[in-house]
Image: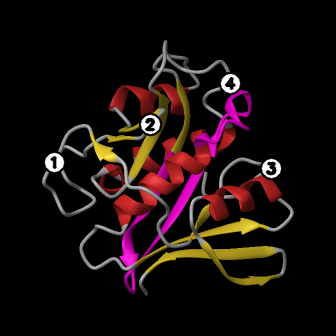
């Protein structure tokens, strides 16, 4: 998820995207370690917090009902391992699963890497191969980046992507992020006011 791959994940480096998502529930928290992170609702997706059971299942290689046949992908496994040891990364401004509203299948994961650095948060995402090409990564990235820009002290959301991954580059551009630099095969994108 935080490492770009062919039309898979991109790691942060870009300002927020287009229209904000609505909240399915509100935690009122302002830190990543908020006890009850909200879910974000987009036209086709629900971006919801990971549960302990889901993290355990991914880390142990078990399958749960309600997952796309190819979930979790390698990036999801890396993120689940990271989240299992970092509860603060699962808070209001942290990581979520990408779930189709129509049918409820988990099809990927997305997250902001908390805490911010100099007012900037990095975003990373990944959608399983069977659900790519539907605009899900763009929709989820736009919603979570807009949400991240509402975090206290945050003025920019960023993402990094390998330039050899044109699908992921398009995700960031369609999500409203602007190219800020490119060197050594890695492009940095940003969205925000900073």
Residue position marked by numbered label 3 in the rendering: 6
Q: Work out whether mark 2 precedes mark 4 in sequence or the reverse, and give the earlier one.
A: 2
Q: Residues within 10 Å of mark 1 (few under 14, many from 20)?
A: some
Tell me if residue 127 is in the magenta stretch: yes
Looking at this view, name the residue that lies furthest to the left. Answer: 28
Q: Position of residue 105 (x, y in %)?
A: 51, 21
Q: Residues within 10 Å of mark 3 (few under 14, many from 20)?
A: some
Q: Position of residue 9 (x, y in %)?
A: 66, 52
Q: Secondary structure at mark 2?
A: loop
Q: Position of residue 150 (x, y in %)?
A: 29, 67
Residue position marked by numbered label 4 in the rendering: 70
Q: Residue at x 55, y 17 (%)?
A: 63
Cα gap from disc 3 to disc 4, whole angstroms: 15 Å
Image quadrant holding the C terminus, namely bottom left
In the rendered view, tell whether residue 191 sits above or below residue 161.
Answer: below
Q: Work out whether mark 2 precedes mark 3 in sequence or the reverse, and give the earlier one.
A: 3
- Specify the quadrant of the image occupied by residue 84: top left
Q: Position of residue 31 (x, y in %)?
A: 22, 63
Q: From which residue to which does the magenta span run? A: 110-136
Cα gap from disc 2 to disc 4, whole angstroms: 23 Å
Viewer-nearest of discs 2 and 1: 2
Looking at this view, name the residue that lies furthest to the top. Answer: 65
Q: Residues within 10 Å of mark 2 (few under 14, many from 20)?
A: few
Give left or right: position of 177 versus 19.
right
Residue position marked by numbered label 2 in the rendering: 43
Q: Secondary structure at mark 3?
A: loop
Residue position marked by numbered label 1 in the rendering: 27
Identify which residue, 8 or 52, lies in the foreground.
8
Are circles 2 and 4 on residues that touch, CB within 8 Å? no
Give left or right: position of 171 versus 190.
right
Tell me if residue 116 is in the magenta stretch: yes
Are circles 2 and 3 on residues that touch, CB within 8 Å? no
């Amino acid at each position: 998820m935080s490492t770009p791959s062919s039309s898979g994940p991109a790691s942060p480096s870009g300002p927020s995207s287009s229209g904000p998502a609505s909240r399915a529930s509100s935690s009122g928290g302002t830190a990543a370690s908020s006890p009850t992170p909200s879910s974000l609702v987009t036209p086709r997706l629900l971006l919801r917090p990971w549960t302990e059971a889901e993290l355990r299942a991914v880390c142990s290689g078990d399958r749960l009902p309600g997952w796309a046949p190819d979930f979790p992908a390698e990036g999801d496994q890396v993120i689940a391992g990271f989240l299992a040891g970092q509860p603060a990364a699962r808070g209001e401004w942290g990581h979520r699963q990408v779930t189709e509203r129509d049918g409820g299948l988990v099809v990927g994961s997305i997250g902001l890497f908390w805490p911010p650095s100099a007012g900037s948060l990095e975003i990373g995402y990944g959608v399983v191969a069977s659900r790519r090409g539907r605009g899900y990564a763009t929709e989820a990235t736009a919603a979570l980046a807009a949400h991240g820009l509402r975090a206290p002290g945050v003025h920019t959301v960023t993402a990094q992507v390998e330039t050899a991954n044109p699908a992921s580059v398009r995700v960031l551009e369609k999500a409203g992020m602007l190219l800020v630099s490119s060197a050594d095969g890695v492009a940095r994108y940003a969205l925000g006011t900073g």
